[in-house]
Structures are given as structure tokens and as C-alpha cells.
């Protein structure tokens, strides 16, 4: 890259970071998770306004020599961010002894999978090339079912902490159920990628990757829990963070070279980190924070391409996807929570919380788009669905609290932080898609 082109790319990078910062601050000012503002500014409003006001803006401001490296940088940021997501996606045995957890997870998973499969079946029948694409039917329908089912564990954890709901019955049910559902969603995504990628070996390759990844994560976690590794990390946390970041990028590159998505490489490394080790919290937080700051670059660079290729939002598909997503999550979570013995108010809170999709949904959509399963038009429609469902959580919880009055949950602690999440050490704040912390001692 020549010096003028490098200066151009640096200036654009600074502008992207400012847009992300503005999006986060505006979202928080109106009571929304920061990731909602980043997505709205980066992938929706910015590219749309720029394209409408100045159609040739991309070729002038963002030539291929600038946009290409920035897109790669944003993709790297997304991969680094996923280390914190994988590290947070952990379940201890004490939280799984509650039978209501299984009922709630099943209640939010099955209706959402059915709704997504029905939506995919309708799109196959509708047979519009801009929506259906050329992906195998099984991969197409299964991916749409998966995108309907997912919940965003990191952003949900932050919402619960901000509202003082972390230690409530509804908070524990929703967060643990969301972790179970997301674990299933990542497995389904592996199957989708295996089916969709030509020459990748299909489901057999996906199964092999899952087994190898699980073994690598287990062995890596045992190695990192040894006293020698703990002492090294405690003594040199910054070098440990650098090594962790390099390992994540290498694992992501290997996963892509094998015809899969970089997500799996990042997740394997994230799952290697011992969840109960205080020494590894800081390196994970630093790596994920760097990724979180670079995620807006991914949003804007991807958003420009999506808007250019899709030609705009397909409103019928967007509205249908959003309605199905809301009804299946809130309705399913409420109905099965009631069957599991929860009261009406708690069951409704659980359903609303599980409707949060956040950046986890965007990662799944990006994986499907990169694999050629989703078209640009359908990607954009589901992106809007993710923003709408995530932004609904806070207002709906406030509405429930206002109607309950004295039955409302306790007010959040000073600074918007609740008590520690069950299973975490006291004084820790859960990782957040809308903040810059993973888990840190206060």
C-alpha cells in the first residue's frame, strides 16, 4: 500500500471508529445496548444515507485499495471479540440442576426453530432469486431456523446487570437458557456450513471439526489451568494477551482455510480459557475489548457492500421475519415457563429477555452470508430483525415493571451494576456487547 493510500485508509479508519463511538453513546443515552447503536449507524443508517445522498461516494471515499484492508481489519476485530463471547458461554453444574432451565431452553428453542424453518420453507416456495439464492435447500432452511433461535448471551448479561435482574429468578432462567440455546445454535451452524460449502465434505466434515475442536478446547483448558501456566499469566498478563490474540487469528485463518468459518477457530480458543481462573480474565478482556472497538469497522464495511448489492430493504420479508422472531421467542418462552411452574410475570420476563439477539445474531448472519447461504437482501432483512428484537428488550421490561408496581424487581446498584452472576466470583461484571468489559475485578 502506497503512502497516500495508507494515509487515506488511516483517515477512514478514524472516521469509522468515531461513527461507532457515536452510535454506542447515542444508544446508551436512550437506554439501549451500545451494540444497537453500532449496528444502526454502521450497517443501516450510514450506508443507506451515504448511498442515497451520494451514490458514487463509495468509489470516491472508499476505493477497493482502502475498503479491502479495512474490511479485513473489521473481520479480525469480530474474531477477537468472539473470544469473550466463547469465554462467557459457560455453564456450571449448579446452574443446570434446576429442571426449569431445561423447560425454558426447550420452550425458546423448539418454537423458534419451527418458525425459522417455516419462514425458510416459505422463501423456498416464494422462489425469488434475490432472497432464495442458490444454496442447498437443507442448508438454507436450517440456517434460517438457527437465526430465529439464537439469543445473545453477552448483551443479555449486560441488560440484566444494568437493570438489577442478574440474581432474580427470571434473570437466572433466561441467561442459562440462552447459553444452552446458543450452544445448540453454534452446532447447527457447523452443520449448515458443512452442507453449504462445496467440496468441504458436508456434515461429515462439520462433525469432524466439532469433535477435533472439542478435544482441542478440552486439552487446551487443562494445559492453561496448570500452576505453571497460571503463574506465567499472572506475571506477564500483557504478553499473555498478545499470544492469545495471535492464537485466535491463526485459528480463525486455519478454520477458513478448511472451508469453514473463522468463528469456529475463535470459539475453540475462547473455550480453552479456564472460566474459573482470575489470572486469565484480564488477557481475555483486553483481546475482546480490542475486537469490540474494531467491530464498527466490520459493520460499516459490510453494510456498504450489503446496501450496494441488495438494493434496499425488502419490507414484507423484514416484517414477517421480525413478527415470527418475536412471537416464537416471547410466546415460546412464556408458554413453557408457565408449564414449568413459573408465575405469569416471571414467565413473561423470561420470554422478553430471550428475545434479545444482539451481535451473536450478526455473527451467525455473517457466517451464512460468507458461505453463500444468505443473499444480500435476506441478510439485510434479518439484520433489521436483529436490531428490532434487541432494542425491544429494555422497553418491554420497563413496561412489565410499570404494570406490576410493587412486584417489580429491585433497582439496579449504583453505576448500573447488579450483584455478581451466579457461578462468577464476587465483584465481576459479565462481558457485554455494549460495553468494553469481559469480567473484571471491581
Image (cartoon, rainbow, N blue to C red):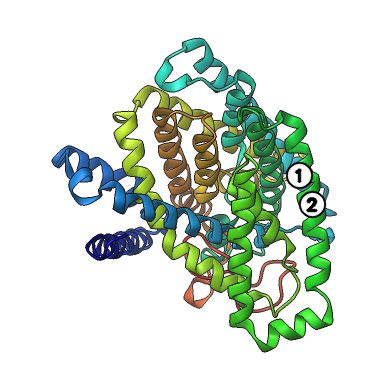
Q: Quadrant of the image for the N terminus?
A: bottom left
Residue 59 appears in which quarter of the rendering? Answer: top left
Instruction: Examine the rendered structure and indicate whether residue 107 appears above or below residue 21.
Output: above
> Looking at the image, is 417 positioned above or below residue 183?
below
Classify mark 2: helix, strand or loop.
helix
Q: Position of residue 187 (x, y in %)?
A: 71, 40
Residue name at image x 64 percent, y 30 percent? 113
Relative to 55, 368 lies left or right: right
Q: Residues within 10 Å of mark 1 (few under 14, many from 20)?
A: some
Residue 53's quadrant in the figure?
top left
Instruction: Please name the residue that numbered disc 2 is placed on.
Output: 214
Badge 1 element: helix
Q: Residue at x 83, y 77 (%)?
A: 226
Q: CA distance from mark 1 to mark 2?
A: 6 Å
Q: Nearer the viewer, residue 193 or 378?
A: 193
Task: Reply above or below: 191 against 160.
Answer: above
The residue beneath circle 1 is: 210
In the displayed image of the protein, which residue is found farthest to the bottom? 235
Q: Looking at the image, do the residues carrying marks 1 and 2 touch, with CB atoms under 8 Å apart?
A: yes
Q: Nearer the viewer, residue 387 or 408?
A: 387
Work out which quarter of the rendered image holds the C terminus and state it. Answer: bottom right
In the image, farthest residue toward the front: 2
Q: Residue at x 35, y 46 (%)?
A: 43
User: Left of 361 or right of it: where is 303?
Assistant: left
Left or right, 59 with reference to 336: left
Q: How far from the left and from the top, in percent, is residue 122?
A: 52, 15
Q: Nearer the viewer, residue 122 or 130?
A: 130
Amino acid at each position: 500500500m502506497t503512502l497516500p493510500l495508507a494515509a487515506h485508509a488511516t483517515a477512514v479508519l478514524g472516521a469509522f471508529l468515531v461513527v461507532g463511538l457515536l452510535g454506542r453513546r447515542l444508544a446508551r443515552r436512550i437506554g439501549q445496548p451500545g451494540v444497537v447503536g453500532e449496528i444502526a449507524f454502521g450497517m443501516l443508517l450510514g450506508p443507506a444515507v451515504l448511498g442515497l445522498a451520494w451514490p458514487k461516494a463509495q468509489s470516491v471515499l472508499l476505493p477497493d485499495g482502502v475498503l479491502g484492508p479495512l474490511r479485513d481489519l473489521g473481520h479480525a476485530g469480530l474474531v477477537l471479540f468472539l473470544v469473550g463471547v466463547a469465554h462467557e458461554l459457560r455453564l456450571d453444574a449448579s446452574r443446570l440442576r434446576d429442571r426449569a432451565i431445561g423447560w425454558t431452553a426447550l420452550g425458546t428453542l423448539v418454537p423458534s426453530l419451527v418458525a425459522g424453518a417455516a419462514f425458510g420453507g416459505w422463501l423456498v416456495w416464494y422462489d425469488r432469486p434475490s432472497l432464495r439464492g442458490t444454496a442447498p435447500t437443507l442448508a438454507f432452511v436450517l440456517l434460517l431456523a438457527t437465526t430465529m433461535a439464537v439469543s445473545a448471551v453477552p448483551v443479555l448479561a449486560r441488560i440484566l446487570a444494568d437493570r438489577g435482574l442478574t440474581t432474580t429468578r427470571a434473570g437466572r432462567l433466561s441467561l442459562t437458557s440462552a447459553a444452552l440455546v446458543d450452544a445448540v445454535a453454534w452446532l447447527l451452524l457447523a452443520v449448515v456450513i458443512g452442507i453449504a460449502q462445496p467440496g468441504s465434505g458436508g456434515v461429515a466434515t462439520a462433525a469432524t471439526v466439532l469433535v477435533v475442536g472439542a478435544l482441542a478446547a478440552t486439552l487446551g483448558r487443562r494445559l492453561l489451568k496448570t500452576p505453571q501456566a497460571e503463574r506465567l499469566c499472572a506475571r506477564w498478563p500483557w504478553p499473555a494477551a498478545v499470544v492469545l490474540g495471535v492464537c485466535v487469528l491463526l485459528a480463525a485463518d486455519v478454520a477458513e482455510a478448511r472451508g469453514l468459518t473463522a468463528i469456529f477457530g475463535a470459539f475453540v480458543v475462547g473455550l480453552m480459557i479456564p472460566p474459573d481462573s482470575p489470572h486469565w480474565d484480564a488477557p481475555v478482556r483486553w483481546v475482546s475489548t480490542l475486537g469490540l472497538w474494531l467491530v464498527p469497522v466490520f459493520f460499516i464495511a459490510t453494510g456498504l457492500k450489503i446496501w450496494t448489492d441488495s438494493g434496499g430493504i425488502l419490507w414484507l420479508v423484514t416484517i414477517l421475519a421480525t413478527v415470527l422472531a418475536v412471537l416464537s421467542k416471547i410466546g415460546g418462552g412464556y408458554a413453557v415457563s408457565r408449564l414449568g411452574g413459573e408465575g405469569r410475570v416471571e414467565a413473561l420476563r423470561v420470554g422478553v429477555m430471550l428475545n434479545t439477539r444482539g451481535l451473536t445474531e450478526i455473527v451467525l448472519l455473517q457466517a451464512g452470508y460468507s458461505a453463500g447461504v444468505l443473499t444480500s437482501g435476506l441478510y439485510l432483512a434479518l439484520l433489521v430483525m436483529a436490531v428490532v428484537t434487541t432494542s425491544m428488550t429494555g422497553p418491554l421490561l420497563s413496561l412489565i415493571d410499570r404494570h406490576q408496581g410493587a412486584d417489580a424487581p429491585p433497582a439496579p446498584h449504583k453505576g448500573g451494576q447488579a450483584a455478581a452472576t451466579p457461578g462468577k466470583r464476587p465483584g465481576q461484571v459479565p462481558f457485554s456487547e455494549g460495553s468494553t468489559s469481559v469480567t473484571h475485578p471491581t
